[in-house]
Amino acid sequence: MFPTGRRFDRVTALFMSLLAAGFVIATFDVRTAETGIADTMRGGAATLLAPIQRGADLLISPVVSFFDGISNLAGLSDENLRLQEQVRELELRLRETSALERKVEELEAINGLAPPLELASVTARVYSSGPSSFDHVKYILKGVDDGIAIGQAVIDERGLIGRVDAVTASTARVRLLTDPVVSVGVRVQQTNETGVVTGLGITTLRLDMFNATTPVTRGSVVVTDGSRFPPGIVVGYVTESADAEVNFVLQTRVETAARFSKIDYVKVIVGWSPLDAEVELEPILIEPPSFVNPSGEPQ
């Protein structure tokens, strides 16, 4: 015999189950009559799955948003790299344009330069320097076929650069003023006294005046004296005042007028030789640099 309470619980549960089943069947019959069994099943499935779908949306949406964010970041990174590459290309073009403009300006300046005494000259482009800073030379793209010969003076729009010391049919080597083996006869424009400048390996030259009777002052213009190069070519400017003493060499320093690190084009004076120095020539007056007064005194 089973206890009465347990039998009652089973009967109650069975009754409730039958009642629920009857309700579902009745509802199913009504929906089937109106819309058909397929629609009713779809509707029922939708009703049963709606809470699950909402839950899934709540779980999946943050994940989808996260991966979308990663995808967007990757796209932005690619776009950033593309823009950086464009900026580099534009900067390169700007540098190339600026370099070309400078070359054009230098070429215009050198072409507009009138050599002293209207001597014949040849414009040439510098294509190389010496292999090291100890080689005080530059190479130009003009040679024997263009009238270039050893010993000719080479100038730019600022002044004397050096002399040709080697030549081929189409190229030439220029020995710069800065080379310690190079000496040039000069004249101090303010005193009209002569001397010799010698390279020191830098843009400063040593000026020795053996028979000077007049002091030289800072800023005085130093030009070629016509003994080896055509007269009147600017060599540089005195950087230190010096007094003349009897039986002593007056010695001082001269800063070159040319800027050797910025030379792209030069002129080679082909219409003059040292033999022409025998002809008496009028000196060519050159204005002193801006840091001195016309009298030669420092400002």
Image (cartoon, helix red, strand yellow):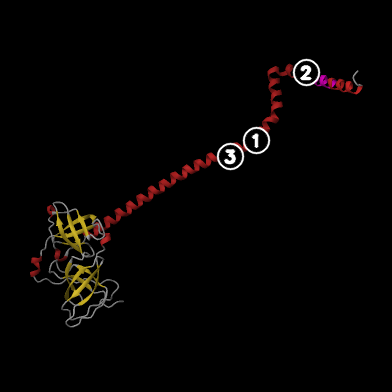
Along the line of sight, the residue nearer the viewer: 127 or 266: 127
Residue 68 on image: x %, y %: 56, 38
Q: Secondary structure at mark 1?
A: helix
Q: In terms of secondary structure, what is the magenta stretch mainly? A: helix
Residue carrying label 2: 25
Along the line of sight, the residue nearer the viewer: 182 or 51: 182
Q: Amino acid at mark 2?
A: Ile
| Image quadrant containing the N terminus | top right
Q: Is residue 73 left or right of residue 245?
A: right
Between the C-alphas of marks 1 and 3, the distance is 12 Å
Figure check: 259 above or below 24: below
Residue carrying label 1: 59
Q: Amino acid at mark 3?
A: Phe
Mark 1 or mark 3: which comes first in sequence?
1
Along the line of sight, the residue nearer the viewer: 113 or 53: 53
For image coordinates 58% across by 39% down, the residue present is: 66
Mark 2 or mark 3: which comes first in sequence?
2
